[in-house]
Amino acid sequence: MAITLLGLGPGNPNSLTLEAREALEQASEIYLRTRDHPTVAALPKHLKTHSFDHLYETLTDFDAIYAAIADDILARGERGDVLYAVPGHPLFGETSVQKILTRAREKNIATRIIAGVSFVDAACAALALDPLARGLQVVDATDLARQHFPRLDPDQPALIGQVYHRAVASDCKLTLLVLYPPDHAVTRVDAAGTPQQKIETLPLAELDHADYWATTRDRPYNLTTLYVPPLPRAASVNALAEIVARLRAPDGCPWDREQTHQSLRKDFLEECYEVLETLDEEDMPHLREELGDLLLHILMQTQIASESGEFLLSDVAAGISAKLVRRHPHVFGDVKVNSTGEIIANWDKIKETENGGKPKPASSIPRALPALARAQKIAQRGKAKADVRALAARVERLPRARNRERALGEVLFALAAYAAEKHIDAESALRVAARDASR
């Protein structure tokens, strides 16, 4: 009672391992994830073959397909020996194999892996690429297509396997364009390791153009792999974090090594204001530059913290990621909302839950905020109501007030409360007015 998981290689029958050939010769029947693979035609003639291709026609969800395959193979494995073969290597991008291995351990069914030449081996050979020297990233096209932002380091090469259809290529392209420019040259490798091997380099923006897919096939095709080279210059957060760490290293920059959390505080605040200024001016080139300066400060603060054992960059990212997921149950959970008002109400309730069921007091609002912005937050948190008539009366009495500074402060606070009630950002409004007045 055992399940043998065999790799058929990339498509050339000559790539079958000796162990695989021996297992195929000794078996009487074999179960194939798909017949749509060149090596299948060269299997020993005495083998009785079965495939799960019909599941791809009857089920639309890949998880359901792979679960159904695993159920079938496991049921047969409980009754006796079974041979299950997949394209490439059983452990490279084969979800059905992973499901079988996990559940076989639970059921105490013995398993055996017979390795095959993977699509990674074949593609690297076709591209003359050393995956270890270049730090190759390997991802599945279906997983990448689902992502809104690619989980890739643009400073490292990437190999995207199983780009089996034009629609998948299109979804992958849209995801990659979030991180790579449209003219970034990528390489499409078809049927790597077979006599039909074809290599073509093209701009990322043209990955899903109809000409190529019309001349090959517009149906599922499992032998297309995409190679995405690194960007021409360091462009990842990891690269920037390495530069910051290098500056702080014993042989780094003396000035950077002297900095502390507190010594950087003033410059950090100035960078925030410079970002706001570029937003006011709608100056996108300068916004990009100023955001870079701000990111540098974030990484510098994080590096200082990591050196003293306070927290790591991964802690910062994990914390905000968990908070965003937790506070957006209408996106990441099953909460239904009908308006932005309901979203804000849910957000406030979640924040109260995080704070022990109590709303945060006004005293918790950072004192370092600009006075007008802090006043608006206090008014908003205290749900202060703005009485326009009372506000006008206060303005009229202002010249006759004994303590004009306090009276002016009350007027400004009333204006901040009015802005909060009307959902106007008072700080931004004043910045715009000051900018216009200075021209």
Image (cartoon, rainbow, N blue to C red):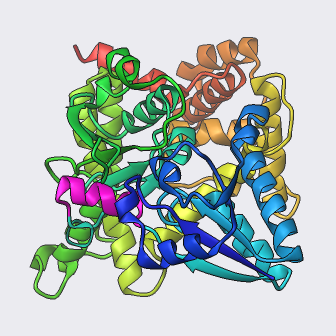
Q: Residue 8 or 125: which is nearer the viewer?
A: 8
Q: Is residue 342 left or right of residue 207?
A: right
- Give the image location of residue 323, x and y in percent: 66, 56
Image point (72%, 13%), residue name: 388
Q: Relative to residue 50, is residue 334 depicted above or below? A: above
- Give the image location of residue 38, x and y in percent: 45, 47
The number of discs equals 0
**Does the magenta run of residues contain 262?**
no
Q: Is residue 34 left or right of residue 103?
A: left
The magenta-colored residue range is 117-129
Q: Residue 237 or 161: which is nearer the viewer?
A: 161
Q: Quadrant of residue 206?
A: top left
Q: Relative to residue 340, is residue 142 depicted above or below? A: below
Whether residue 206 appears in this view of the structure is yes
Q: Residue 369 or 353: which is nearer the viewer?
A: 353
Q: Relative to residue 332, is residue 14 depicted above or below? A: below
Classified by dominant secondary structure, the portion drawn in magenta counts as: helix
Image point (21%, 67%), residue name: 130
Q: Relative to residue 59, is residue 238 depicted above or below? A: below
Image point (77%, 43%), residue name: 347
Q: Residue 254 or 32: which is nearer the viewer?
A: 32
Q: Quadrant of the C terminus?
A: top left
Q: Quadrant of the N terminus?
A: bottom right
- Give the image location of residue 121, x and y in percent: 33, 63
